[in-house]
Image (cartoon, rainbow, N blue to C red):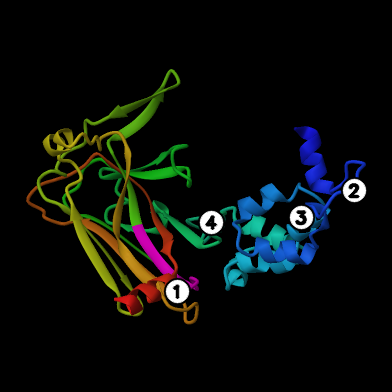
Amino acid sequence: MGSSLSNLNDGTNGMSMGTSLGDIPESCVACVFMYLTPPEICNLAGLNRAFRGAASSDSVWDKKLPANYQDLLDLLPPERYHTLSKKDIFAVLSRPIPFDDDSKELWIDRVTGRVCMAISARGMAITGIEDRRYWNWNPTEESRFHVVAYLQQIWWFEVDGTVRFHLPPGIYSLSFRIHLGRFTKRLGRRVCHFEHTHGWDVKPVRFSLSTSDGQNASCEYYLDDVERDEALGQHKRGCWIEYRVGEFIVNGSEPSTEIQWSMKQIDCTHSKGGLCVDSVFINPIGDLKEHRKKDFVI
C-alpha cells in the first residue's frame, strides 16, 4: 500500500506509466486549492512538490484571509508580521489577538477564515461590580480570559457592553456565556456550589443588542427553572450555557460597526444571585452573498 501511494505521488515505479499527480502543474493545484478549506490544503501539502508549493502560495492564502485582515494585523506590533507569507499571516491571525487592555480578543476561524470576537466580563459595564458585597472576580481556567465575574446577591442586575470594529461583511450572532452557581476544585475534582443561586426563576432576564446602523434584537430567558429543565431533560445548574441574543448583518467593513448589548433583570421586588458571567461572543454564522441569494429567491 505504501508503494502504491509513493507511485501515485511521483508517477514512477520503474515502468512506463500514464499521467499521475506528479505531473499536475503547481498552478493547476493552486486553482483547486482555492475551493478547499485551510485544513484540507494543509493535509494535501505532503503529497508531492507541486502540492507543497501550491499549499504555500500567497495567491491561495490571500483568498482564505478576510478582506480586511490588515485591520486585525494593526492590533499587533509590525515586527510580528511584516516579513511573513500569507500562509503564516493566516496562522498568526487564527490565534487570539488581545486588545483593549486584554479585555477583548479577535481571531479568524481556521476553517472559514471569518472573524470571531470575544469580550471578557472585565470589558463590560456591570452594575455594582466595585462593591464586594455584590460581586467578586473569580480566577478560573474555565474562561479564555482566566477570570469571571461572580454575583453573590443584588437587586438591580445589569450588564452592558459595546465594541466597535471593522468587521468583514457577513451575518453574525451575539451570545452571553453564563454559569449558574460557582465552582471550585477539590482534590482535583470540579465541585459546584449553589448557596447563593436564587431569584432567576421569578422573572426572566432580558437580553438585547443593537448596531450603529439601526439593527436591533432582543429576547428573554428564565435562567433557572428547575422543574421545567428537569421535565425537558436539561440541566443548567453547574454548566456553562451560551444564551443567544440575536443576529445582525454587516454589509461592509467601512465604516466600522458598533455593537451594543445588555443583559438585565431590574425588577427590584426580589433579589437574585449565584451567577457567573464569563464573556460575550460575536461569531460569524453566514455568508452575506448566500443571504442575498435567499432573499432574491423569496
Of the 4 image quadrants, the one containing the N terminus is: top right
Secondary structure of residue under mark 1: helix
Distance Cα–Cα, label 1 vs label 4: 18 Å
Left or right, 249 with respect to 7, comes to left
Mark 2: amino acid: Ser
What span is colored magenta in the figure?
A: 163-174
| Residue that badge 4 annotates | 109
* Residue drawn at point x = 24 percent, y = 31 percent: 194
Q: Earlier in the sequence, mark 4 or mark 3?
A: 3
Is residue 73 among the parts visible in the rendering? Answer: no
Check if mark 4's residue and mark 3's residue have beta carbons within 8 Å.
no
Q: Position of residue 46 (x, y in %)?
A: 76, 47
| Residue 218 appearing in the image | yes
- Residue identifier under label 1: 289
For label 3, the crowd category at 10 Å Cα-Cα, with few meaning under 14, some 14 to 19 and many 20 or more, is many
Look at the numbered disc 4 and give the secondary structure of its residue. Answer: loop
Residue under circle 2?
16
Are circles 1 and 3 on residues that touch, CB within 8 Å? no
Q: Position of residue 222 (x, y in %)?
A: 17, 48
Secondary structure at badge 3 equals helix
Identify which residue is drawn at 30% across, 75% down: 215
**Mark nearer the N terminus (1 vs 3):** 3
Is 169 within the magenta? yes
Name the residue at 67% across, 62% down: 32
What residue do we see at 77% from left, 66% from top? Answer: 27
Of circles 3 and 2, the one toward us is: 2
CB under 8 Å between discs 3 and 2 = no
Kind of residue indicated by mark 3: Phe
